[in-house]
Amino acid sequence: MRIISLVTLFSAFTSPVFGASLLSYGMATADAKVISEGKIFSVYIHPHENLLLLQPKLFQANTAIWNIADYRAAAELLVAPVGCGIQSVHAITIMGETWEAEYVCPTEINLRELIKTQRPSLKRGLPLHL
């Protein structure tokens, strides 16, 4: 079961626009672990839309100072090996430690299915592959 911080929960329930987005990912554990420049992210793929949810892995120092470039780099690191890219990235909680990235892929790439089938290795931090 996913552990969500009290700040994240508060942000989700106090922001009607962003909260609906956060809650739509469900309560499953992360689909992937991405390590980008020493920063470790938990990544969740949206069940219906071309979106990724990115959160800092728990118990890391200074996550509040991570910026949009850090989250974009992590999202790109996950999707780039299969030819996909990141179109946009934005914070979806008031405190800014939960971000959403919109991905785009060539028509022949089903990112959701690739992540689903490779989930065990992705959770160990291994790269996505075709």
Image (cartoon, rainbow, N blue to C red):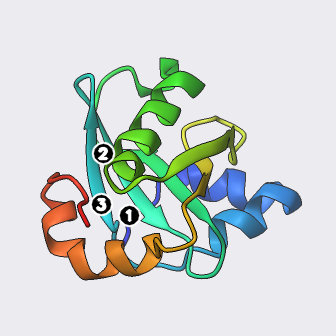
Image quarter of the C terminus:
bottom left
- Residue contact between numbered discs 1 and 2, judged by CB atoms under 8 Å: yes
Left or right: 130 in relation to 19: left
From this view, report whether residue 33 is shown above or below residue 35: below
Tell me if residue 1 can be seen. Answer: no
Q: Quadrant of the N terminus?
A: bottom left
Give the residue at mark 1: 3
Looking at numbered disc 1 in the image, what kind of residue is underneath it? Ile
Query: 13 or 104: nearer the eye?
Result: 104
Instruction: Tell me which amino acid carries mark 3.
Output: Ala
- Residue 32, disc: 3
The number of callouts visible is: 3
Q: CA distance from mark 1 to mark 2?
A: 9 Å
Q: Which residue shows up at 77% across the image and 69% down it?
A: 20
Q: Nearer the viewer, mark 3 or mark 2?
A: 3
Badge 1 crowding class, 10 Å Cα cut-off, few under 14, some 14 to 19, many 20 or more, is: few
Q: Residue at x 33, y 68 (%)?
A: 31
Q: Could you tell me which residue is drawn at 58 percent across and 51 percent down? A: 8
Crowding around mark 2 (Cα neighbors within 10 Å: few <14, some 14 to 19, many 20+) is few
Give the numbered dot on residue 68. none
- At x 45%, y 47%, the residue is 55
The type of residue carrying mark 2 is Leu
Image location (x, y in percent) of residue 24 = 65, 76
Instruction: Give the residue pinned by disc 2.
Output: 58
SS class of the residue under badge 1? Answer: loop
Sequence-earlier tag: 1 or 2: 1
